[in-house]
Image (cartoon, grey):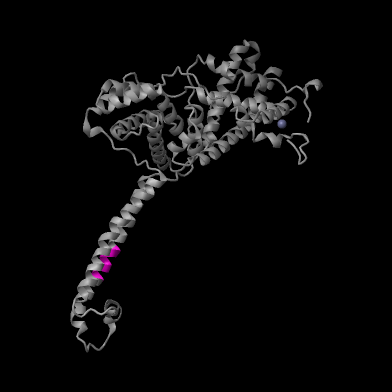
Amino acid sequence: MFDQKGFAVATTCRDVRHLYDAYLDGELSPSLAAEVQAHLLQCPECQREVEMARACGHLIASDPGAPVLPDDFASRVVAQLDQPQTILPMPPIMTRRQRRRVLLERAAAAFVPAAAAILLLVVLIVPPGSREPESPRVVLGDSSYRPIDALGVREWVGPTFSTLQSTGRMADELQGLYHMTVREAESRIPIRPEPYLTAVPVPTLPDGSAFLTELLNPLIQVLSAPPPPPPDDEIVRF
Amino acid sequence: MIRSNDNSDGRLAVDEERGLIRAAQLGCKESARRLILSHQDRLSAFIYRMIRDRHDTEEVCQEAFLRAFGALRTFDFQHRFSTWLFTIAYRLCLNAMRKSRDYAGGIDFTSMASTHRHPATEADDDVPDSVANTDEARRLRDVIWNSVEELTPHQRAAVLLFYREQMSCQQIGEVLDMPAATVKSHLHRARLKLRETLAGRMADGWSSVRFDASAG
Ligand SMILES: [Zn+2]
């Protein structure tokens, strides 16, 4: 590591620990890689850790360790492809954007008929001849509790108003339905799985794991040998 | 690079894979079979490492293939077949895990996970090194897989796809349905956690077993 003036200062374990993965992946710049290497030369503990990470990666990459599928697995799957009723639909796999689009489409699908119904009612409520610019608002807002009906508004507002109320209920129902479909859609799309807590002991594999020994031998060497103090002349100091 | 990049596990070249998918889309069963054969072992290993159940592994594996072929007409040739397949399988794994967690009633088996291996015995001194090492290697392997098991499903999937499938963060993001940057941080945290878990187990388990044995 370098201080503000660019002078190399002592590299501590903490400085380089977060770089080990990138170091093993070969993703560090040559200068950073050299720094990590220098630290590893003088720090047996970190050397161990890197060796462990390396062995761990190798093992995860190449240990088969999984149950072997039956020999006729592929043929059986192909045979099932012949029967249309066994072909399963895709599980809901959508990107966030697709998911949002589907939800919006559903919202639009629920919204358009409701809006159309309300619009239609507003048009019906106000007969063409008597339409004043503000009359729909008056009818919708005030008619239900107006005691005097001098203009005979009630006569025709009454039935339409109840229709309007039932339209409101319908809209609520549509709304509810929409929420239900959203909930259902979300329940079918696993978005945030909870942490998986159950773990089962690893079954032991049959013998003949010579490759395993070979794979893990470097680490075993490192682990088995008591960490030797690095000879002075090999220490690269910063 | 610590990721294996051998081609010996039957991985298909891009062109060959596309040809097989096109043929399978037109109903060619032999092409479908070859696609399955070249992916089944990798897929079942991934599923097994995710759900940890031998019986369910085959079932989930089969379902993943059936679903993939059921929707093959919509396959996007910009992707690899494996990305598509693992995406389906990952979803199915999450569902299977949810089911088995409900079934297990939320019991945490983690503490039982690392106790089934016999530690090396004092007989180690009398046997050739290679045998002792095989035992140690097996123990080490168990320790490593147990640590992998303790990662969250996201982290575990990311680690498996990174090391075993050599997928980029971008590809892993497609499988897990998250941005590549999020995958990167999952992966970083997962690897750090693995190192810490292993360091802890090596410190209190490994060295004492090994050193006691050779001292006695
Ligand atoms: Zn260090």
At which x and y percent is residue B157?
47, 34
Q: In the displayed image of the protein, which residue is found farthest to the right?
A: A232
At which x and y percent is residue B190?
56, 36
Locate ligand 1 by image quadrant. Answer: top right
At which x and y percent is residue B38?
38, 21
Query: Could you tell me which residue is drawn at 19 percent across and 85 percent down?
Result: A152
Query: Could you tell me which residue is drawn at 60 percent across and 30 percent down?
Result: A27
Exactly how many numbered labels are in the figure?
0
Of residues A108 and A63, the one nearer the viewer is: A108
Query: Could you tell me which residue is drawn at 30 percent across and 26 percent down?
Result: B22
Of residues B203 and B65, the one nearer the viewer is: B65
Q: Is residue B109 left or right of residue B84?
A: right
What span is in magenta? Answer: A165-172
Relative to A212, is A150 above or below? below
Of residues A62 and B38, the one nearer the viewer is: B38
Of residues B114 and A123, the one nearer the viewer is: A123
